[in-house]
Amino acid sequence: MRLVVRRLGRIKLMLLITAISVVMAVALNLIFSFLFDTDAPLLQSIIRAAVIPLFIAPLVSWYLLGLLIDLDQLEAEMNKLATYDDLTGLYNRRALFKSCHLLHRLAVRTKETYCVVIIDLDFFKKINDQYGHAAGDQVLKSFGLILKRVTRDCDLAGRMGGEEFCIYLSNTKQVQVEPIVKRLNKEIQNNLPNYDGTQINYTISLGVAENRPDLEMSFEDILKKADIALYEAKNSGRNRSVFFQH
């Protein structure tokens, strides 16, 4: 029913329901007149049968369709909140990992190589402390837009929480990640967020792990290795990318 409402719209569907109600009322009236052989004039009987649904059906259907539309919008909003991070518009942690597990199983079946990249915004706490949390949110939003531009349709990007992000790069080998990292850093430099008239500079650290068919690892294993690489990048000075060496 919700699909019909979306396709036809509230007004068209209301008119359709009204028309059906009138036709059914007239048909029932004719059947009743035929079965019980009433003496009432036929035309008068038809008009009387049509008048009642002609007034009642639009009012009732308009109200009920309104409730259905509100319910549909509420459900869509709930699904959105359950899937996307409300600050960056990227997948939230739950939706990201659920999708990544599905892609991992597909990669295993098709013997596809993919890479997982975990990204951390360097010294993000200092940004919040110096400029305020609203400025920090602006940085996160800006970086979220950059991730959307850099990733392909076949990739997944999401916010794991706080200032940590994750990218699933489908059908990608480790040697192909470096150009993506360079583009990511270039996009950051060219699109620094501006908050209250102040341009906020920030850098990122990245940990990259590759999953090949011969490794036979789970997605959790790959994620853990990317996290180890990120830890190394942060401990070795930040503002760099480290590739996990199998």
Image: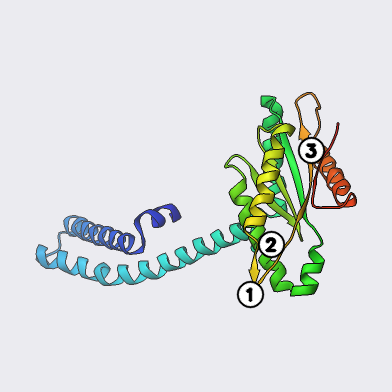
Q: Which mark is residue 140?
A: 2
SS at circle 2: helix
Expressed as whole percent of the image width and height from the top left, the position of residue 137 reads 69, 67
Label pair 2/3, CB-CB below 8 angstroms: no
Gap in angstroms between the C-alphas marked 3 and 1: 38 Å
Q: Residue at x 73, y 48 (%)?
A: 166
Q: Quadrant of residue 181?
A: top right
Q: Is residue 237 left or right of residue 140?
A: right
Asked whether 197 or 10 is in front, the reply is: 197
Circle nearer the N terminus (2, 1): 2
Expressed as whole percent of the image width and height from the top left, the position of residue 36 reads 19, 59
Label pair 2/1, CB-CB below 8 angstroms: no
Instruction: Tell me the residue that label 1 is attached to.
Output: 197
Kindly identify the amino acid type of the residue bearing the numbered disc 2.
Answer: Leu
Q: Quadrant of residue 222?
A: top right
Instruction: Tell me the residue that label 3 is attached to.
Output: 209
Within 10 Å of the Cα at label 1, are there few (<14), some (14-19), or many (20+) other Cα atoms?
Answer: few
